[in-house]
Image: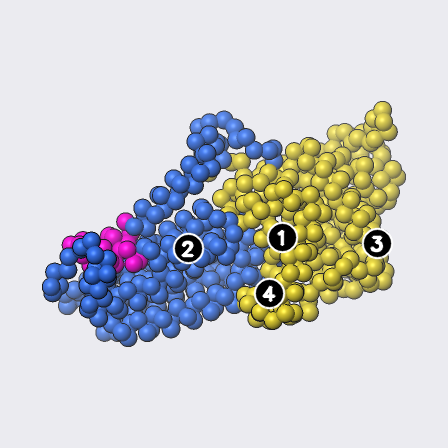
Chain colours: A blue, B yellow
Amino acid sequence: MTGNPSLSLDLVSDVRQLVAFPFMVNALEAGTIVAVLAAIVGWYMVLRRQSFAGHTLAVMAFPGAAGAALAGLPTALGYYVACGAAALAMGGRSRPTMRGYRTETATIGTVQTVGLAAGYLFLSLNTEVLSGFETLLFGTFLGVTQNHVLVLLAVAVVALAALALVARPLLFATLDRDVAEASGVPAGALDVGFLLILSVAVAATSQVTGALLVFALLVAPPAAAQAITVRPLPGLVLSVAFGLVIVWLGLGVAYFSPYPVGFWTTAFAFGLYVVVRVGVFVGRGGARAAWTTRRGGWVVASPRAGS
Amino acid sequence: MNDALPATTFPAAAPPRPATPGPAVSVSQVAVRLGGKEVFTGVELTVGRGEFLAVLGPNGAGKSTLMKAILGLVPLAAGTISVLGRPPTQSRPSVGYLPQRRGFDGGTRVRGVDLVRLGLDGTRWGIPVGISNPARERRRAERRRVREVIELVDAAAYAHRAIGELSGGEQQRLLIAQALVRRPELLILDEPLDGLDLPNQATVAALLRRICVEEGVSVLLVAHDVNPLLPYLDRVIYLAAGRAVAGRVKEVITTRNLSSLYGSPIEVLRTGDGRMVVIGQPEAPHVHSHRHERPD
């Protein structure tokens, strides 16, 4: 990096340094786009208890990118194709519901393993030294071009529009599947549809955070938001705000520090989640309530009314 | 987007009942086969307007299947079913349905009021963004209806808390509100008292009776334990061993009838204050709510 940036107490000068180079501006734009996308799609994912499916889709970015590199195609294309294919493979098998849910975790786990193995195979078949291997897994903000940003923006707009279209039936089917189906909501089609939206969000986010660190943006912001509020709209707004804070802080601090951006975004996401959980715990006077049977603790009874 | 679907609108005030002619449910000589096995045959049943009727019987007798047939979710092998004077599939918008269920687990981070609201607009595509006066007026009317129905089931005190934090009885009241929010003419409930403790069984049974009387809604429910319902029922229908016996509570619930239906000795006793109690009824294996289990 040219001109060794250094942090000062002058915030204006810090920001000016931050946006001095086009690559950094691109990275901030890309990060902002995926933060919004991941926070909103992730809100549904956390509510639907599909974090494992989300993680599997994220891992699929690895074989996708390795395969694309092997075939001489753009890496981004590999991300979308592999994630979409995995979503379809899992789509018919996962049936998340709020009560007594028996998500097909075995199917998801199998898909994940096959994907990882395929990725490793593609890597070993590739005779050229794959320079971006680490980038693939742990993300970068150096290689983001203006084109990338435009593609990300288009993808995010399409994914969010699709999610807006199904927003209420999807929420209904998530919370109350039997009643939703009896009222005519196509819950099975929505399962597959949501996994496809999720795969797009994951593929887009992977390009900034890397395949393994997608969760910094996909899980932490919505999980923290849902711990704070049970209202849908404020929850979504809060989730987006958390996502933006994590990305901007992560990119900003990484710019001035020798450590990678993936580490910083994940560290901020984790820190935020911990602070929120502790804050909610203390706020509810939770020391007494926390170790009740419901949370899997040791103590005896919860003070709530009988079932 | 298509916020103005006629199927999702609801009358601003309770309509004079009945809105459609004929009995609420009319089941005639119905047989259902599932997977080649006959579940029941020759079932006759009529639910009059504003009646409160329970389908009773041992597990596996086909009570839930009969409800699904009435909702048009299972094909009939023989006979006809008419709901609110129409075929079951056409009458669905006027029927509230509460399936057999376990509770929401403690981690469900959605408010009861949002759940009730989904009963009203959960089938609509798109997000409500209309800023025209009719659109805003409609949203206000919907919020009013949600408040109204929550007050009807006495759930106002906890409707704004996360549904997962509520007790089974409180959850059940909110789910009943959800089933009522579109002003159905018929309410079908599958084991609404299952998984509730005794005081809650009594209050939910009383609530259903009150809805039946005050709102003029015909109520048809499935139960395996008749005792909490006995004070409130108009009529019962017993399903056992593939056949059905229907009639007034006092005619059907007798020691001789029940013992013959269940094929095991059952006694119907009268308490000092004239209430009936059924003793020796083979209890269905109790399905416990997952809410109180430790997470693995």
In this picture, residue A261 sits left or right of residue B68: left
Question: Foreground residue, B265 or A47?
Answer: A47
Q: Label 3 marks which chain's residue?
A: B
Residue identified by numbered label 4: B124
Amino acid beneath label 2: Ser
Q: Earlier in the sequence, mark 3 or mark 1?
A: 3
Q: Quadrant of the N terminus of chain B?
A: bottom right
Q: Label 1 marks which chain's residue?
A: B
Residue B88: which numbered mark, if any?
A: none
Question: Where B89 falls versus B105 (above or below)?
Answer: below
Residue B49: which numbered mark, if any?
A: 3
Question: Foreground residue, B69 or A60?
Answer: A60
Amino acid beneath label 3: Arg
Q: Residues within 10 Å of mark 4 (few under 14, many from 20)?
A: many
Please provide the residue range marked out in magenta. Answer: A247-267
Q: Are marks 1 and 2 in contact (CB under 8 Å)?
A: no
* Residue at the spot 43% in from the left edge and 50% down from the top edge: A225
Residue identified by numbered label 1: B116
Q: Which residue sits furthest top?
A: B272
Is the residue at mark 3 from the same chain as the one at mark 1? yes
**Residue A273: percent from the left, percent from the top?**
36, 46
**Residue B2: percent from the left, percent from the top?**
60, 71
Residue A239: which numbered mark, if any?
A: 2
Q: Quadrant of the C terminus of chain B?
A: top left
Q: Are marks 1 and 4 in contact (CB under 8 Å)?
A: no
* Residue at the spot 70% in from the left edge and 58% down from the top edge: B182
Mark 4: secondary structure: loop
- Which numbered mark, 1 or 2, is in the foreground of this view? 2
Residue B207 lies in magenta, yes or no? no
Q: CA distance from mark 3 to mark 2?
A: 48 Å
Mark 2: secondary structure: helix
